[in-house]
């Protein structure tokens, strides 16, 4: 349905079009060709600020009304010089079309403001403090489950916890303000202009109707309870977590997941079959295995503060390397909990650990060399490191004492070396 606002019914004229959808209609003022014509004449085609504010206010009230009636999708609102789109309940289409025509031709925006008032919902009343039962047909019209879903979204937008329940012909609500949301709004008043705390410290009157118990979890166990008291005390915290990530000033969404990997290991992807405990990944292995080794190699890199990942073969096609780079992955409970990266080399010097002596003469015997060894935090002190070392020595056909260690050896690495080879170790 299209209405022409100008005598010129070509592409240069302005039109109002009604585009129906399942839940609402879009009433669109199209000024595209009209704006181009004004540009060529040197006139200003921009919409008045009052027009834009009236359109935005209407859309805010109307979209709330459409969600209230059951729509669960999103809206992309916005008014520009070329187009104004108003999302409209079907019952108000004709009135909105006339209001839009009046606003464009007469610069009279009162009709849009009046329609906004008609569509406004008493959300602040519904989400006020206190336990209450809202009755269908008296307080609201949609089915209770639909109405409760709408209220939950509105409460979340306001930072409230709803504590709601839908019944056959009513909805019980008890909005409350979490302490974290209260602190957030008090700390940043510019983000929440006009916000007033109506919920903290609210006390229910003695004659308040309480929602009936319907089974399941015990209900109303906090009735007449005293509020929790809070104290602001200085908390000393390290800038760096033991897992290697630095703690930021706010919420760090990455840290919990990375810390869990550091503590329990990296979960084996679903596209990898890991039938037994130990896997040996080489530079010629499938890319999924090489990438898994690279993911695990990031954990000791962060924890130790190293510049580079000890496994750098998680990209490109399979290739053979003269040094025979390889990674030993130990799996438990579908997580990689142990990691050893190694290669073969022929340059070593002996170091006696008991005397903490310097390095001895150069030895050019080919030996397996440990580039990095790492164990998930909860598996440490359980022999996992020794198990990985033994697997490396067995593959090469030597003893653990003949395995070489990359320099410098970390404090944890030296502790392991003293246990497996007390007399000394080879250093590469």
Image: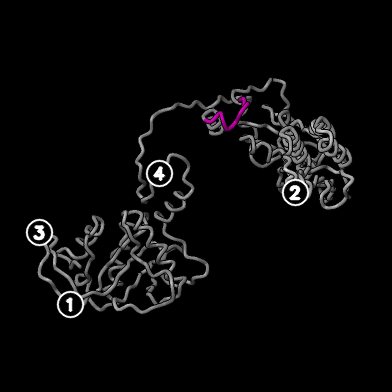
Which percent across, then down, holds residue 165?
71, 38
Secondary structure state at the residue bearing disc 3:
loop
Question: CA separation, marks 1 and 4?
Answer: 45 Å
Q: Nearer the viewer, residue 383 or 309?
A: 309
* Disc 4 versus disc 3: nearer the observer: 4
Establish if 156 lies above or below 208: below
**Which residue corresponds to mark 4?**
247
Label 2, label 1: how far apart the Cα atoms are: 82 Å
Q: Position of residue 304 (x, y in %)?
A: 31, 54
Mark 3 neighbour class, 10 Å CA radius: few under 14, some 14 to 19, many 20 or more: few
| Rendered location of residue 115, percent (x, y) | 82, 33
- Which is more N-terminal, label 1 or label 2? 2
Left or right position of 404 against 163:
left
* Circles 1 and 3: CB atoms closer than 8 Å: no
Q: Circle 1 sits on which residue? A: 365
Number of numbered discs present?
4
**How far, Cα to Cα, is label 2 from label 4?**
53 Å
- Camera-side residue: 399 or 319? 319
Badge 2 element: helix
């Amino acid at each position: 349905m299209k209405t022409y606002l100008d005598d010129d019914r070509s592409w240069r004229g302005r039109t109002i079009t009604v585009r129906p959808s399942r839940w609402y209609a879009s009433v669109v003022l199209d000024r595209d060709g009209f704006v181009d014509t004004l540009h060529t004449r040197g006139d200003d085609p921009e919409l008045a600020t009052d027009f834009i504010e009236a359109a935005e206010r209407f859309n805010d009230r109307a979209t709330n009304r459409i969600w209230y009636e059951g729509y669960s999708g999103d809206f992309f609102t916005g008014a520009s010089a070329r187009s104004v789109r108003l999302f409209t309940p079907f019952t108000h289409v004709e009135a909105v079309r006339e209001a839009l025509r009046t606003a464009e031709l007469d610069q009279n925006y009162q009709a849009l403001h009046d329609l906004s008032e008609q569509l406004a919902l008493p959300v602040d009343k519904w989400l006020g403090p206190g336990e209450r039962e809202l009755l269908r047909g008296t307080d609201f019209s949609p089915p209770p489950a639909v109405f409760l879903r709408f209220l939950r979204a509105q409460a979340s937008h306001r930072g409230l916890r709803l504590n709601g329940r839908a019944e056959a012909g009513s909805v019980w609500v008890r909005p409350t303000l979490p302490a974290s949301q209260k602190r957030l709004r008090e700390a940043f008043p510019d983000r929440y202009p006009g916000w007033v705390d109506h919920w903290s410290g609210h006390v229910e009157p003695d004659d308040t109707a309480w929602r009936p118990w319907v089974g399941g979890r015990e209900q109303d166990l906090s009735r007449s309870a005293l509020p929790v008291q809070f104290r602001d005390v200085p908390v000393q915290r390290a800038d760096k977590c033991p897992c290697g990530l630095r703690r930021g000033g706010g919420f760090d969404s990455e840290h919990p997941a990375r810390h869990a990997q550091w503590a329990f290991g990296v979960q084996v992807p679903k596209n990898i079959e890991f039938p037994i405990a130990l896997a040996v990944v080489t530079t010629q292995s499938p890319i999924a295995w090489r990438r898994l080794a690279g993911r695990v190699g990031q954990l000791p890199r962060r924890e130790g503060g190293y510049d580079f990942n000890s496994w750098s073969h998680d990209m490109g096609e399979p290739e053979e390397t003269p040094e025979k780079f390889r990674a030993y992955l130990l799996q438990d409970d579908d997580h990689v909990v142990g990691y050893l990266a190694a290669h073969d080399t022929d340059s070593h010097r002996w170091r006696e650990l008991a005397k903490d002596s310097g390095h001895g003469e150069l030895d050019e015997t080919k030996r397996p060399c440990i580039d990095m060894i790492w164990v998930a935090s909860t598996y440490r002190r359980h022999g996992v490191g020794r198990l990985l070392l033994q697997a490396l020595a067995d593959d090469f056909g030597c003893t653990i004492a003949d395995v070489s260690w990359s320099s410098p050896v970390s404090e944890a690495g030296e502790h392991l070396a003293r246990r497996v080879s007390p007399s000394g170790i080879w250093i590469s």
